[in-house]
Amino acid sequence: MGLNDNMENESISKELEAALNSFKTKSNQVPEGYFDQFEVDVMQKIQANKSSQNKVTIISLFARHKKYLVAASLFFAIATGYLFYNSAENKTATMAQVDVIDIETLPDELIEAYVSNNELIAEVEWNSAIENAGTSISSTNN
Amino acid sequence: MTDQALITQFQNGDSKEGAFTQLLKRHQEPVFFQIKKMVIEHADADDIAQAVWIKVWNKLDGFKQESAFSTWLFRVAYNETLNFIAQKKRLQAQTKQNHQDHGLSHPSSHNTIKESDIQIKLERAIAELPEKQRFVFMLRYFDAFDYEKIASITGTTVGGAKSNYHQAVKKMTELIHNA
């Protein structure tokens, strides 16, 4: 019987079993000291790979994610441009927006203050308009 | 220390090399012999085994210990062995050699010890097996791995692993008696 004594190996003939055992013996032959040297060889290769891997890792990181970085940059540029354009339009709209105030709602003090502040200007403009029209009117507001 | 403790030590960065070499010493022989049964040539087995352990070093930080370390290790060995055999076949096809060795060296062609006819037939029969069947058969017959573990290693189902094993036995029997 083979190494595995389960019933499934009943289909393996004694001839095959003997050949398999010989095959195993042959396969398990290694040079003397092989496994001690194997450990040394593996660790040497790992050390050699370490130093070169450090640089490669950095490069490969960017290379691997390059397309995502490009897409993100493009999106950021478009988003920034849109926001800037939108903001500029809003400002203009805000500047162009004029609040219409109903004069009846204004307090009398405010109206009187406005009139007295602008009275002289209004008189000058009024006189200029009269002069331009070719007539003269004396003011009764002394 | 258990494998889990050594892996945890490695992943914590605590004496990585010490933990790794302990794992290597513990598992190197069964892995190497499994690979050698697949490829026969010692030099090829040596190359593959070194590649396996270098890959283990590089990937061990990400090993989540959802399976046993030996299962994962043999999975790495399985993939590396099959990649090696596939690459060798491509090279042989390119150089237009007339070997029909299916990734193995020609049986007994360099062996100075006289081998029985049946042994030569067996090695040819093994070489004729598809790689997956061959790997499954070796794990089951020589290492007595259970089918659940074999299925995890080869990425198949338990039923698939059983089928692979029985197909391998059937083909070897036919080839030995008919060749």
Image: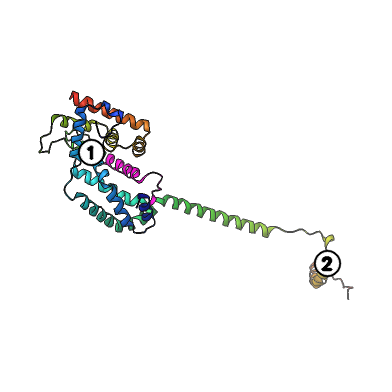
Q: Quadrant of the C terminus of chain A?
A: bottom right
Determine which of the numbered discs, if any, sits on residue A111 in the image.
2
What is the chain letter for disc 2? A
Determine which of the numbered discs, if any, sits on residue B81 in the image.
none
Q: How many marks?
A: 2
Magenta-drawn stretch contains A72: no
* Residue highlighted by disc 1: B37
Disc 2 crowd, CA 10 A, few/some/many (<14, 14-19, 20+): few
The magenta segment is B61-84
Residue A47, image quadrant: bottom left
Residue A15, image quadrant: top left
Nearest the viewer among A80 and B25 is B25
Q: Is residue A104 left or right of residue A21?
A: right
In percent of width and height, residue A52 lies at 30, 57
Q: What SS does tag 1 mark? A: helix
Q: Is A34 situated above or below B143?
A: below
Q: What SS does tag 2 mark? A: helix
> Residue at 37% across / 33% down in the picture?
B158
Q: Quadrant of the N terminus of chain A?
A: top left
In percent of width and height, residue A32 lies at 16, 49
Disc 1 crowd, CA 10 A, few/some/many (<14, 14-19, 20+): many
Magenta-drawn stretch contains B67: yes
Comparing marks 2 and 1, which lies closer to the viewer?
1
